[in-house]
Structure formats: structure tokens, C-alpha cells
């Protein structure tokens, strides 16, 4: 427990993404797809929008970030985790 | 492997003006990896409003009114947080690429469009607005000029431009007025409606 810093943070973050079970696609678009996800701790269902960055330009990425910011603004706070940028 | 080089940062600013509106889809968590962005959102188990219109033929006035009320509430909430949705609509449709499109990039990503109004649960009581991909934050005095939306649901070309220049918030209300008659149209009428009818303003004169 004495070792704090990136390693500890990494564990938490990996745990964050792993705390959801991803299932089949509910909807598939050109860039994003929406999948059913179930939170492992309490088996609560969620919808996960997964956006592939591969084909997105800088401007399109800005649109994605704007959507996240707006969703946060309209409906409470959501934590944002960024891995391996 | 992907998660080896890890960087954690808060993109959010905790003191931003924000509201918690029950008629907007909620975002719980966001994860970003090297290749993908994950957005954990509320699951709308009730399905799309348009599917229910197709199944039931047409809605009763009461039911249609309830949907419009929910959407109007969501719009009010968004507008009070200075957010304009700009893509309120009820149907699943193809978007046609127009030559006069200002932002080609944005439009090409909208070829196959999902519905934006969803039922929150199977009992079909609450309608929520989803997909804020085209939404914008609007500050006082700033005019949004980007052409956007789904052709069937934006206003008549000239009026559309005029309204948008005035205020994008008006445009959202316009789209809502456009969507409202669809909820009550008999099935035979709906199939005869084309984009042409819509853009020439035929829907406005239809009895609500």
C-alpha cells in the first residue's frame, strides 16, 4: 500500500472498465455501436455507446467530446477515465 | 497491453452550470482507450417511440400529448442549461446527402439514423431524449449557423434558415411541432407522406 501513483491509479481504472459485462449490440451505426452492458456488482443494465476512433478526424472527435460534455451538463456528473492516449 | 501506458485525467469542470433532467438520457461513466471511447448510459428498455407508432397504428390524443409533454420538458431543461439539441425527431430514416450541405463530414456520419426519442421502460410511461451528437452549447449572443438535422424534420428551406438565424432554440420547438402530428396520423396517410410534402409545409396544416 506504500506504493501510490500510476500503478494504483491503473488498477482502479482497469477495474472501472472491467466492472461492466459487455453483451450483444443493440444498435450499430457508421461510427458508433450501442451494446448492452451489465454492471458486475449489482447486475444493473446499462447501454454502452462505443465509438471507434480509427476513422474519426480531429473535428469528429471534437463532436464526440462535445456530446460527452453536453450529456454531463444535462444530466448530472459522470466520471471520465482516459486510458493510453 | 492497451492499458499499460495509463493516464488519468479529469476532463470535467466541476463548477459548470448543469441540471439533472429526468427526460434526458443519463450518462454514467466514460472510458477512453487508445482506439475506442466508451460511454456508459442509461438503458432505455422501452424501445423507440416510432416502433410503437407502427405497431399501434396511431396514438390516442392523450398518449400523443404525454409524449409531447415529456419532450417539451426535456427541451425546456436543455434550454435552461443553454444546450440546443438540434435533432429532435421520431423516425428511423435515411438521410440524403445534399450538395448544399455546409458540414459534409457531420452529414456523412448521419447516413443511417437512430431514433432520438426512447421509452425509458417497458411500461411506456416516460419518454426520454437521447443522442446529443448534434447538440450544441449556446452562449448568449452566439448564433449557431451549421446546417444540421434530418431533412424531414427541419423547417422549410427559407424558414429554416430564418428561424435558425433567429435562435436555435426556436428550431428545436419547430422540430417538435413537426414530430407531433406524426404521432396521430393514420397509417395510410403516413405512408403517402414524402419529404416533398413535409418541406412544402403540408404537415403544418394537418389537424393535430
Image (spheres, coloured by chain):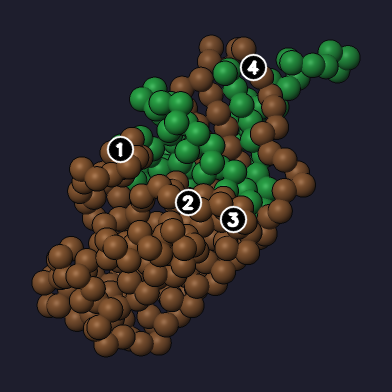
* Residue occupied by mark 1: B104
Chain bearing mark 4: B
Q: Nearer the viewer, mark 3 or mark 2?
A: 3
Chain that bears disc 1: B
> Is residue A72 rendered to the left or right of residue B115?
right
**Picture coordinates of residue B186 (x, y %)?**
19, 81
- Image quarter (top left, top right, bottom left or bottom right) of the C terminus of chain B: bottom left
Residue extending furthest right? Answer: A2
From the viewer's perspective, is the residue at label 1 or at label 2 nearer? 2
Q: Chain letter of disc 3?
A: B
Instruction: Look at 18% across and 63% down and name the residue there.
Output: B195
Chain A painted colour = green
Chain in brown, by letter, is B
In the displayed structure image, the side of residue B44 where residue B183 appears, left or right:
left
Say yes or no: labels 3 and 2 on the same chain. Answer: yes
Mark earlier in primary sequence (1, 2): 1
Q: Residues at badges 4 and 1 in contact (C-beta under 8 Å)?
A: no
Q: Is residue A21 in view?
A: no
Neighbourhood count class around disc 3 (C-alpha, 10 Å): few under 14, some 14–19, many 20 upward = few
Residue holding disc 2: B144
Q: Which residue is mark 3?
A: B141
Instruction: Give how far apart the Cα atoms at labels 3 and 2 are.
Output: 10 Å
**Which residue is identified by label 4?**
B6
Amino acid at each position: 500500500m506504500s506504493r501510490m501513483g500510476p500503478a494504483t491509479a491503473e488498477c482502479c481504472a482497469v477495474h472501472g472498465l472491467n466492472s461492466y459485462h459487455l453483451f450483444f449490440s443493440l444498435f450499430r451505426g457508421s461510427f458508433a455501436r450501442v451494446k448492452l452492458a451489465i454492471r458486475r456488482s449489482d447486475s444493473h443494465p446499462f447501454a454502452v455507446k462505443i465509438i471507434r476512433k480509427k476513422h474519426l478526424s480531429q473535428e469528429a472527435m471534437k463532436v464526440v467530446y462535445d456530446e460527452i460534455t453536453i450529456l454531463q451538463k444535462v444530466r448530472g456528473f459522470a466520471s471520465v477515465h482516459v486510458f493510453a492516449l | 497491453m492497451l492499458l499499460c501506458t495509463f493516464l488519468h485525467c479529469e476532463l470535467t469542470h466541476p463548477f459548470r452550470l448543469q441540471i439533472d433532467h429526468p427526460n434526458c438520457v443519463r450518462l454514467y461513466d466514460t472510458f477512453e482507450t487508445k482506439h475506442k471511447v466508451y460511454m456508459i448510459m442509461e438503458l432505455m428498455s422501452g424501445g423507440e417511440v416510432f416502433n410503437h407508432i407502427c405497431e399501434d397504428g396511431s396514438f390516442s390524443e392523450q398518449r400523443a400529448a404525454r409524449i409531447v409533454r415529456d419532450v417539451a420538458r426535456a427541451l425546456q431543461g436543455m434550454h435552461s442549461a443553454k444546450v440546443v439539441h438540434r435533432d429532435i425527431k421520431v423516425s428511423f430514416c435515411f438521410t440524403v446527402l445534399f450538395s448544399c450541405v455546409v458540414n459534409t463530414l457531420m452529414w456523412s456520419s448521419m447516413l443511417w439514423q437512430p431514433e432520438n426519442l426512447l421509452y425509458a421502460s417497458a411500461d411506456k410511461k416516460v419518454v426520454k431524449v437521447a443522442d446529443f451528437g448534434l447538440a450544441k452549447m449556446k452562449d448568449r449572443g452566439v448564433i449557431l449557423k451549421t446546417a444540421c438535422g434530418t431533412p424531414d424534420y427541419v423547417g422549410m428551406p427559407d424558414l429554416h434558415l430564418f428561424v435558425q438565424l433567429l435562435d436555435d432554440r426556436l428550431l428545436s420547438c419547430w422540430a417538435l411541432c413537426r414530430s407531433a402530428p406524426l404521432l396521430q396520423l393514420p397509417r395510410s396517410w403516413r405512408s403517402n407522406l414524402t419529404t416533398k410534402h413535409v418541406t412544402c409545409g403540408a404537415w403544418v396544416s394537418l389537424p393535430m
